[in-house]
Amino acid sequence: MKGFGGGGLQKLMQQANQMQSKMKKVQEEMNQKEFEASSGGDAVKVRINGAMKITNITIKPDVLSAGDVEMLQDLVLTATNEAIKTAKETTDKEMSKITGGVGMPGMF
C-alpha cells in the first residue's frame, strides 16, 4: 500500500509549486511595469510601479498658482488612488490567468 494519497498527492504538490513559481514570475514582471493616472484634467499625474511605489508625480504649474492647497491635495489623492487601483486590477488579471480565476489571498 502506498503512503497517504499515493502518487496523486505528490503530483498535486508539484503542480502547486509550479503555480507558485509562475505567480512569482508574474509578480516580478508586474513590479517592473508602471501605471499612470491623472486627475483634474491632467492637472496632476501620478505614476506607480507594480510594487505600488510612487515613481513620479507631475503637477501643472497653474494648479500651484491657484493657491488652493485642499484642491491640490484632493487631486494628488485621487490620482494616486486611481493608479493603485489600475495596478492592482492589472496584477489580479494577470494572476487569474495562472490560477484560473481562483483567488489566492496572501500570496503576493
Image (cartoon, rainbow, N blue to C red):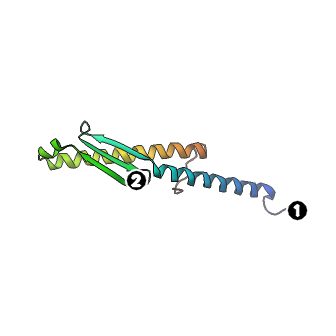
Position of residue 1 relative to residue 61, above or below, is: below
Residue 60 pos. (x, y %)? 21, 43
- Residue shown at 21%/49% (left/top)? 73
Q: Give left or right: position of 6 versus 61.
A: right
Q: Give left or right: position of 91 versus 63.
A: right
Amino acid at circle 1: Met
- Residue shown at 27%/40% (left/top)? 39
* Mark in front: 1 vs 2: 2
Amino acid at circle 2: Met
Q: Name the residue under label 1.
A: 1
Q: Could you say which is closer to the camera, residue 25 or residue 9?
A: 25
Give the distance between the C-alpha atoms of the residues marked 1 and 2, in whole angstroms. 50 Å
The quarter holding residue 36 reads top left
Q: Name the residue under label 2.
A: 52
Q: Could you say which is closer to the camera, residue 71 or residue 54?
A: 54
Q: Give left or right: position of 79 versus 71.
A: right
Residue 29 pos. (x, y %)? 51, 50
Crowd class of label 1 (few under 14; some 14 to 19; many from 20; radius 10 Å): few
